[in-house]
Amino acid sequence: MGQALLQIRDLHTTFYTRDGLVRAVDGVSIDIEAGESVGIVGESGCGKSMTAMSVMGLLKKPGIVDGGNILFDGQDLTSMAPREKRKLLGNRISMIFQEPMTSLNPVTTAGRQVREALLLHNRGMSRAQAKDRVIAAFELVGIPDAAKRYGEYPHQLSGGLRQRVMIAMAMVCNPGLLIADEPTTALDVTIEAQILHLMRKLQEEKGTSVMMITHNLGVVAQFCTRLYVMYAGKVMESGTVKEIFKHVCHPYTEGLMRSVPDMESKERLYNIRGMVPSMLHLPRGCRFCPRCPYSAARCFEEEPDMYEAAPGHFVRCFLFEPEKGERA
């Protein structure tokens, strides 16, 4: 592997609240190669979206990035001047947000919103040229009668069409990195399949790297080549999708896998015991140990490092310390 397009190194994102510190992202490191699809999975509140917001510079007070580096194409976003960062964000790095209805301005037509993003990063482009390019982008993402849809408001579009508008907005500047934060959450399974197919097609044609943030392991299996599993602000397991699905190692990942519904099974749906811990009052030692079926006394006292369970497959669990060997 050469130098990754996106390199997140020991990232710390903290919210300084009245009740105490919330370490939403605590020492996360992620690599994404050019043209690669990487999945970030975990339960709600595990830090997936906060990682993306940190990359995009969209954190709101009292949240700040207070440690680590975010390197995009060799440039450190954490030390970059705001003016220079604005040239990258929304242009070379774009993001698709979870809910298109709340992400789109309800009093501005869909076409104008995408056109504004295009004009912001292409100062020499005329409005007429920008409009033509937006309509072409609408056609590319499969919006029927694109010229008509250009002048329609978000409430006049279906959920699937609104999400396609968001994808067109994210892709219109031909970004090197696309961050997709739960892009299919609000869609039915038919539209979800269409959106994933569309994103794959755009990725293949444009060579765009994708960070897919999701809780849906089925989406990861279809779309991604590598996977990072997050829990309580930390990466618990990472490796190729093929390796992790074939040889799941971390007890938390194991629980997530077992929680996937199986329509042919008559057994009661499995759920991970216990509750996600409060980020204000994290357990001592391993953050997953109170819910882990394999936890030992050591787990409640010490925090494990990331250990290499197999080439390129890393696990934050004492069961995979080199001298301990793998769990049977």
Image (cartoon, helix red, strand yellow):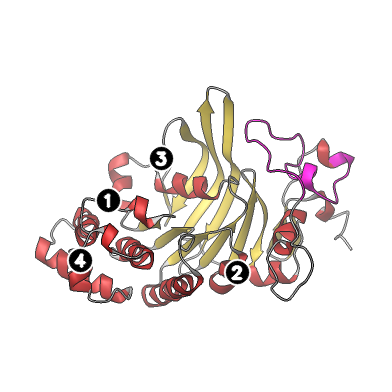
Instruction: Using the numbered discs, state the Cα–Cα distance from disc 1 to disc 2 in whole angstroms.
Output: 31 Å
Instruction: Using the numbered discs, state the Cα–Cα distance from disc 3 to disc 2 in whole angstroms.
Output: 37 Å
Instruction: Using the numbered discs, state the Cα–Cα distance from disc 4 to disc 1 in whole angstroms.
Output: 14 Å
The residue that mark 1 highlights is: 105
Whole-percent x, y for residue 33 in the image: 50, 64
The residue that mark 2 highlights is: 218
The residue that mark 3 highlights is: 79
In this view, the residue in front, 283 or 72, is: 283
Closest to the camera, between mark 3 and mark 2, is: 2
Disc on res. 36: none
Mostly what secondary structure, the magenta segment?
loop
Question: Crowding at label 3, few (<14), some or many (≥20) Cα neighbours within 10 Å?
Answer: few
Q: Are marks 4 and 3 in contact (CB under 8 Å)?
A: no
**Kind of residue at badge 2:** Gly
Closest to the camera, between mark 1 and mark 2, is: 1
**Is residue 252 visible from the viewing direction of this image?**
yes
Whole-percent x, y for residue 302 in the image: 80, 38
Tally the numbered discs: 4
- In primary-sequence order, the first of circles 3 and 2 is 3
**Is residue 89 visible from the viewing direction of this image?**
no
Closest to the camera, between mark 4 and mark 3, is: 4
User: In the figure, is residue 85 to the left or right of 71?
Assistant: left
- In primary-sequence order, the first of circles 4 and 2 is 4
User: In the figure, is residue 129 to the left or right of 269?
Assistant: left
247 in magenta? no
Q: Which residues are magenta?
A: 273-298
Under tag 4, what secondary structure? Answer: helix
Under tag 3, what secondary structure? Answer: loop
Question: Crowding at label 1, few (<14), some or many (≥20) Cα neighbours within 10 Å?
Answer: some
Q: Which residue appears at 82% of the width and 52% of the height?
A: 321
